[in-house]
Image: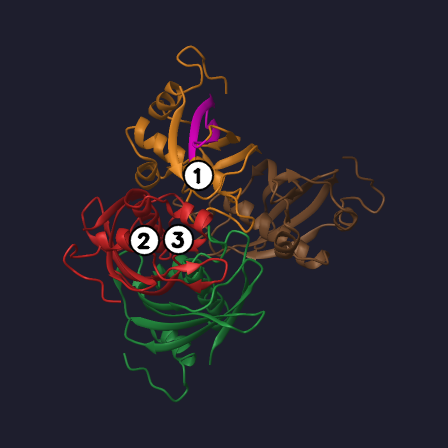
Chain colours: A orange, B green, C brown, D red
Amino acid sequence: MAFTSVQKIRFDDVDGAGIVYYPQFFRLCHAAFEDFFDTAAPISYPELIRDRRLGFPTVAIESRFDAPLEYGDVAVVELVIERVGRSSVDFKYTVRRRRDGVHSFQAKITTVLMDLDTRKPVPLDAELRMILEQSLAGSPHSPSDG
Amino acid sequence: MAFTSVQKIRFDDVDGAGIVYYPQFFRLCHAAFEDFFDTAAPISYPELIRDRRLGFPTVAIESRFDAPLEYGDVAVVELVIERVGRSSVDFKYTVRRRRDGVHSFQAKITTVLMDLDTRKPVPLDAELRMILEQSLAGSPHSPSDG
Amino acid sequence: MAFTSVQKIRFDDVDGAGIVYYPQFFRLCHAAFEDFFDTAAPISYPELIRDRRLGFPTVAIESRFDAPLEYGDVAVVELVIERVGRSSVDFKYTVRRRRDGVHSFQAKITTVLMDLDTRKPVPLDAELRMILEQSLAGSPHSPSDG
Amino acid sequence: MAFTSVQKIRFDDVDGAGIVYYPQFFRLCHAAFEDFFDTAAPISYPELIRDRRLGFPTVAIESRFDAPLEYGDVAVVELVIERVGRSSVDFKYTVRRRRDGVHSFQAKITTVLMDLDTRKPVPLDAELRMILEQSLAGSPHSPSDG
């Protein structure tokens, strides 16, 4: 049930120690999230923001960095939806290096559907819930619990 | 008449060749532009955007890169206003390395005052014109020509 | 015992939803980490990397995002050292908005002293240990436990 | 003879005015430059840097911004090689918006082949010269002039 996005490490993704700057891993995750929307949903993430004034800001992160990426690497980013709550959605991301398959990074990122004008959480509507639940880890048999 | 902003090169400003990534020089310039507004104007640049829905997007650049910056360097960014037109303003930026005073970069950046909602150029009002002309290279005696 | 670094939110720190892009919070933390070194240590972080080929890559993050930052905000970043182990150091960061003092973000970031050439962890030497332990939360009375 | 690279505008490419931050256009150009190397050359740009310690730092830019890009846009970046000198190479980049074909940006970017250790320009070797000249605007009939 995982969605995969493949992304080249670019010339400016590295830091002063010569490896990918650790906050860039979250940029890789966000790009995978955007690609997931482009692929799985009838509305893109930019459209959700512009037309419906909704977004999924991040409210919590737990992550682990296991092996560095370097300039020239290609990142294989995997996105799995772990939990769909009333307003919140937990995404699990893993990043592997394409050259050797080594596991580089993983994160659990909790987001909340927010009205961008009021800045308050709003419940997922039926369409967003369906899109997300279809991609739940273990679906179609695992119910949402949140 | 120059305005100076001093900025540390940060851990993620470098590129895969180990020197400051060239587009970051424009980030240094923009930070100096923001600092200029914070210092010289009664309204900050964020307030100009949010409250008056005006901005100064860049329409042209001519620039030269003379010596690299490295991680650990401190950039001394100098901003001079070269020309104030009806809607357009030309800024000249120079960047020197603090450690040795070496000239690293210079750019002429042309901006236009734009209404952010209509996306059309608008004439500078009297207040913005005054702020900018006071900082004109060679002022108070050099009239604007644009 | 906290170290504080004050940083302006810049024009490019925001995202497509108009608030500070969440990975930028880690950039704010890293800048505070660099400023801490510049202030507290006899060697800057760039010198540690260049001259001694040592660095503190991040190996784990736990973080929470409580209130957004916007363009025009000033971030007050507080760094506290929570634990100094044999090779690992846990930093706790909190970010508040200067305009209203609202707590925006907190993170526990675990780093490991690494030899940048071998890419292996190395024990903290006496000097680095002393610098870090002097800034331990609760020091001078709290011993390190790691 | 143009090389084309298609790139999604990402969530963090915008600025506080809600359009793509102008230095990001140079990031788009550099990504196209990297993609050109991946496609046209027997060695990738990361390999050129790592294995041969050579790079093409930018020494001059002339550019014009004609229409903004927004979050959700897809950038069509076209790279043409305009001149191959002894050490220097001039690239011309144009960026169009995919949704409407509107011309957004163009730049002439002059680079110099540099030894990354000595930081001195070095002449293009026969292989690099051949790769670049094959992609010269107007080639195969236009000789290099530099």
Q: Are marks 3 and 1 on the same chain?
A: no
Q: Which mark is residue A73?
A: 1
Q: Position of residue C69 (x, y in %)?
A: 51, 48
Q: Position of residue D39 (x, y in %)?
A: 29, 42
Q: Is residue C100 above or below residue A58?
A: below
**Residue C64, image quadrant:** top right
Q: Residue at x 35, y 52 (%)?
A: D30
Q: Is residue A95 magenta?
A: yes
Dot 3: few (<14), some (14–19), or many (≥20) neighbours within 10 Å?
many
In front: A62, or A12?
A: A12
Q: Is residue A106 above or below residue D64?
A: above
Residue A145 is left or right of residue B106, and the answer is: right
- Start-end of magenta stretch: A75-99
Q: Which residue is mark 2?
A: D128
Residue B85 is left or right of residue C80, and the answer is: left
Q: Are marks 3 and 2 on the same chain?
A: yes
> Which residue is outermost to the left?
D141
| Secondary-structure class at tag 2 | helix
Q: Are marks 2 and 1 on the same chain?
A: no
> Which residue is outermost to the bottom?
B141
Q: Is residue D92 above or below residue A18?
A: below
| Secondary-structure class at tag 3 | loop
Residue D68 is left or right of residue D1, and the answer is: right
Between marks 2 and 1 in the image, the one whose residue lies nearer the viewer? 2
Q: Residue at x 44, y 39 (%)?
A: A73
Q: CA distance from mark 3 to mark 2?
A: 37 Å
Chain hosting mark 1:
A
In front: C91, or D94?
A: D94
Q: Earlier in the sequence, mark 3 or mark 2?
A: 3
Q: How many marks?
A: 3
Q: Is residue B64 magenta?
A: no
